[in-house]
Image: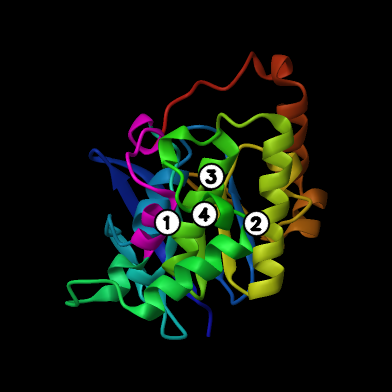
Amino acid sequence: MALVWCDNITIAYEGQIVVRDLTFQIGQGNYLCIVGENGSGKSTLVKSLLGLKAPMKGRIVLGDGLKQKEIGYLPQQTDVQKDFPASVQEVVLSGRLNSRGLRPFYCAADRAQAEAMMRLLGIESLKKSCFRDLSGGQKQRVLLARALCATKKMLLLDEPVTGLDPIVTSDFYQLIKEVNEKSGIAVVMVSHDIESTLRDASHILHLQETALFYGTAEEYKKSKAGRMFLEGISHPAERGGSFVQYNH
C-alpha cells in the first residue's frame, strides 16, 4: 500500500476552493516534486498532508503504519526561525517532541537519533553553536536534521531553498537526494525550481487547482503540461511577465 493516498480531495482556503478533485499517491521511497504557479494550491495541500486542514471532500489515507505526526516537515523559512535562540543540538533534538509522548524528558534514544542526524548532515561540529549565528545553508541543514528526527518514512519540504545562494542551493538539493536514496525515506518537495528538482525527482505532481499532471518525472518532461510549464519559466516575458506572488 502507498504511504499516502489522496482520494478525490477538495480543499478550501479562507472559504475559496483552491484544490479540487485531486487524486494521487506517494509510494515508499518516492521523490515527489509538487510544482505549479503561485496560488495553485500547493501550500494548502501541504497543510492537509500534515493534518492541519481537513479536506471538504474526499479522503487522505495513510498506509504502512505512517501517522501524520511522524511526517518530517521542513517549512518555508521565517524570521522567527532564523533568530531562534537555541543551540543546534537543542533545535535538532526538538524534532523528537512528537515521539516523546508523555515522557517529560528526552531519553537516550532521542539523543542518539539527534546525534545520528547531525552526523549524517555534517553539522555535528556545530552542535553547541547558537542557531541564529549560523549561515543560511547551515540553518537549513539543522532544520533538515530536525525534520529527519521526526520521521523514518516521509519528509515534506515546502520551498526549502528560498533565500539561499545558488551554491548552497545546489548542495542542499544533493543532500536531499542522498537522504532519499540512502535512507529510503520518501521525499515530497514543493518547489518553484522545477528545472533543478527534475534532475532528482522520481515523480511530479503539477497542481493548478486540480492535477494538470501526475506521473514520473520522465513522463512529465514529455507531457504537454510539462513542456508548457518549463517553457513558461524559461521565457516569462512571453507569458506577460513574472508570476504574481501569493500563497495558498
Q: Looking at the image, do the residues carrying marks 2 and 4 touch, with CB atoms under 8 Å apart?
A: yes
Q: Which residue is tagged 3? A: 140
Q: Nearer the viewer, residue 103 or 126?
A: 126
* First reached walking from the N terminus: tag 1 or tag 3: 1
Q: Nearer the viewer, residue 206 or 28?
A: 28
Query: Could you tell me the amino acid type at mark 4?
Result: Leu
Gap between marks 1 and 2 measured at Cα: 20 Å
Please determine whether, in this image, residue 178 is positioned above or below residue 198.
below
Q: Looking at the image, do the residues carrying marks 3 and 4 touch, with CB atoms under 8 Å apart?
A: yes
Few, some or many C-alpha atoms within 10 Å of disc 4 (few <14, some 14-19, many ≥20)? many
Query: Could you tell me the amino acid type at mark 3?
Result: Gln
The secondary structure type at the circle numbered 3 is: helix
Percent x, y of residue 231? 77, 31
Residue 76 seen in the figure: yes
Percent x, y of residue 113? 47, 73
Query: Which residues lie in the magenta part?
Result: 79-95
Gap between marks 1 and 3 measured at Cα: 14 Å
Q: Which residue is drawn at 36% across and 55% down?
A: 90
Gap between marks 3 and 2 measured at Cα: 11 Å
In reply to whether residue 84 is colored magenta, the answer given is yes
Q: Nearer the viewer, residue 196 or 141?
A: 141
Left or right: residue 228 versus residue 22 is right
**Which is in the foreground here, disc 1 or disc 4?**
1
Query: Could you tell me the amino acid type at mark 1?
Result: Gln
* Numbered tag placed on residue 176 in the rendering: 2
Q: Residue at x 57, y 22 (%)?
A: 243
* First reached walking from the N terminus: tag 2 or tag 4: 4
Gap between marks 2 and 4 measured at Cα: 9 Å
Q: Which residue is tagged 1? A: 89
Q: Which residue is tagged 4? A: 144
Quadrant (top left, top right, bottom left, bottom right) of the C terminus: top left
Query: Could you tell me the amino acid type at mark 2?
Result: Ile
